[in-house]
């Protein structure tokens, strides 16, 4: 089972297609399976965010060594997530994240947190299961 990471924004964000041969980060509109997750967000635009392998498991912990592909020297998903967040925060005061295991998109929130964009890559465990995170500048 995979960790699913969703991002809510006040403004539309660019879609970044997943390319298996260049897998750093992708941002996608919600498909029918994921739409139910929108109920957790106060923001009108909600996206799925994934990394290599197509899922968000790599965002579960700061120690990413167990999940690194062969080109690990250039693979920095925490930094890419921070950069994506910083770019989104140029146009709004906060963004929202919800992390859950696939299949739990409609489950209630178990954990809440407020963080800065830098804290996204500094915490030992970035996202907990069924955690809603508000990230501010």
Image: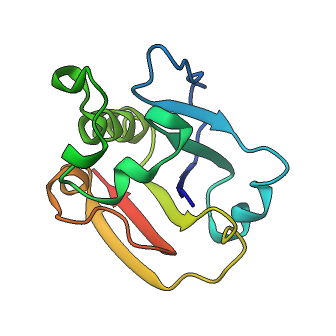
The quarter of the displayed image where residue 74 is located: top left
User: What residue sits 19% from the left and 44% below the top?
Assistant: 65
Residue 69 horizontal side relative to residue 41, left or right: left
Q: How is the image coloured?
A: rainbow
Q: Is residue 29 above or below residue 37?
A: above
Q: Is residue 58 visible to the viewer in this orientation of the structure?
A: yes
User: What residue sits 26% from the left and 54% below the top?
Assistant: 120
User: What residue sits 39% from the left and 72% below the top?
Assistant: 128
Residue sticking out furthest to the top: 21
- Residue 109 lies, in percent from the top left, at 56, 81
- Residue 61 lies, in percent from the top left, at 27, 58
Q: Tag count in the figure?
A: 0
- Residue 81 lies, in percent from the top left, at 35, 40
Locate the N terminus by quadrant. bottom right
Residue 9 horizontal side relative to residue 121, left or right: right
Q: Is residue 43 above or below residue 15?
A: below
| Residue 81 vs residue 42, the one in the foreground | 81
Residue 31 horizontal side relative to residue 116, left or right: right
Residue sticking out furthest to the right: 32
Q: Is residue 93 visible to the viewer in this orientation of the structure?
A: no
The quarter of the displayed image where residue 90 is located: top left
- Residue 16 lies, in percent from the top left, at 55, 23
């Amino acid at each position: 089972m995979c960790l699913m990471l969703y991002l809510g924004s006040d403004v539309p964000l660019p879609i970044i297609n997943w390319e298996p041969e260049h897998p750093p980060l992708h941002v996608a509109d919600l498909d029918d399976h994921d739409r139910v997750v929108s109920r957790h967000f106060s923001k009108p635009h909600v996206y799925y965010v994934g990394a290599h392998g197509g899922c968000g498991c790599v965002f579960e912990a700061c120690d990413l060594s167990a999940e690194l592909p062969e080109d690990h020297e250039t693979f920095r998903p925490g930094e890419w997530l921070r950069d994506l967040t910083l770019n989104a925060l140029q146009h709004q005061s906060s963004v929202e994240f919800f992390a859950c295991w696939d299949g739990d998109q409609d489950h209630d929130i178990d954990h809440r947190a407020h963080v800065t964009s830098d804290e996204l890559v500094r915490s030992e465990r970035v996202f907990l299961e069924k955690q809603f995170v508000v990230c501010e500048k």
